[in-house]
Amino acid sequence: MFWTVTLSLLEGFMTTLELFALTLLFAIPLGLIIAFGSMSKFMPLKWLSKTVVWIIRGTPLMLQLIVVFYGPELIGGWFGELGIDNPIFNWLAGMKGLDRFPSVLLAFVINYACYFSEIYRGGIESIPKGQLEACQVLGMTKSQAFFRVVLLQVVKRIVPPMGNEIITLVKDTSLARTIAVYEIIWNAQKFIKNGGLLWPLIYAGAFYLIFNGLLTIIFAKLEKKMDYFKA
């Protein structure tokens, strides 16, 4: 039984790792783009970015998962009931076969990109403006000043909050079961429903503890490595 449970949890953990890795792959650069939008001097773009971030940060991730998965079909159906014949709305109404994992991934990427964007924005705005002015005096362009002077300081300052969010992401992957994505918690719950066994769920918690422990060590070493750079 122990080996059967272990194999099942490992299978679910692979899905958890895949969701975790792909979310970081897409959310980290997207968050930087949203951060630039939030700091833009072009007011429509600035307020659009801030509004999206406000909505995403102000609503539960579970709700966002449900909206992303069921929303397109429901929206298309509403317009169909109103008698609006549009190819886009008809396509949305027919999205019953949309895969669950891509829906979860999309919701996670948008959610964490918004959180990352605020971390980026805070890090960038914490750099004294005098440094940028000094770079301009030295003849550097804005892009050169950002990538050669500002970015290193920003990275140092955002490592702790980014580490916290990434560790939170590991635990939030369990919400994927909301729309029946078979991650590790889902696989553990099967043994509760079928055999009344509670220990597989506790066993699943050990996977999270070990993985988060490894991430904690990695971020601690990263912070220590960047101590040479005084910001």
Image: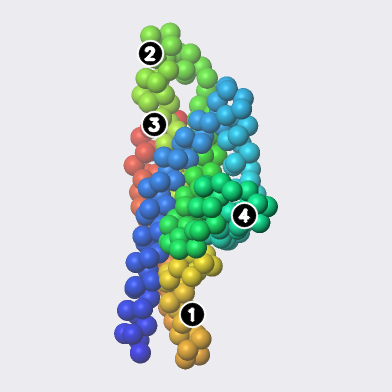
Residue 153 drawn at (x, y percent):
43, 31
The C terminus lies in quadrant = top left
- Crowd tier of the residue under label 4, counting other residues whose Cα lies within 10 Å: few below 14, some 14–19, many 20 or above: some
Which numbered disc, 3 or 1, marks the residue closer to the eye? 1
Residue 152 drawn at (x, y percent):
39, 31
Query: Label 3 near label 4: C-beta < 8 Å?
Result: no
Amino acid residing under circle 1: Gln
Amino acid residing under circle 3: Leu
State which tag comes first along the sequence, 3 or 2: 2
Direction from residue 17 to residue 49 in the image, left or right: right
State which tag comes first along the sequence, 3 or 1: 3
Amino acid residing under circle 4: Gly
Report the residue at 48% width, 80% height from top. 189
Q: Mark 1 points at which residue?
A: 189
Above or below, 199 against 75 in this view is below
Query: Label 2 near label 3: C-beta < 8 Å?
Result: no
Direction from residue 77 to residue 141 in the image, left or right: left
* SS category of the residue bearing label 3: helix
Q: Which residue, as the protein is rendered here, is positioned at the far right?
A: 82
Q: Mark 2 points at which residue?
A: 140
Report the residue at 52% width, 19% height from top. 129
Q: Is residue 14 visible?
A: yes
Rendering quarter of residue 154: top left
Amino acid residing under circle 2: Met
Q: Nearer the viewer, residue 224 or 198?
A: 198
State which tag comes first along the sequence, 2 or 1: 2
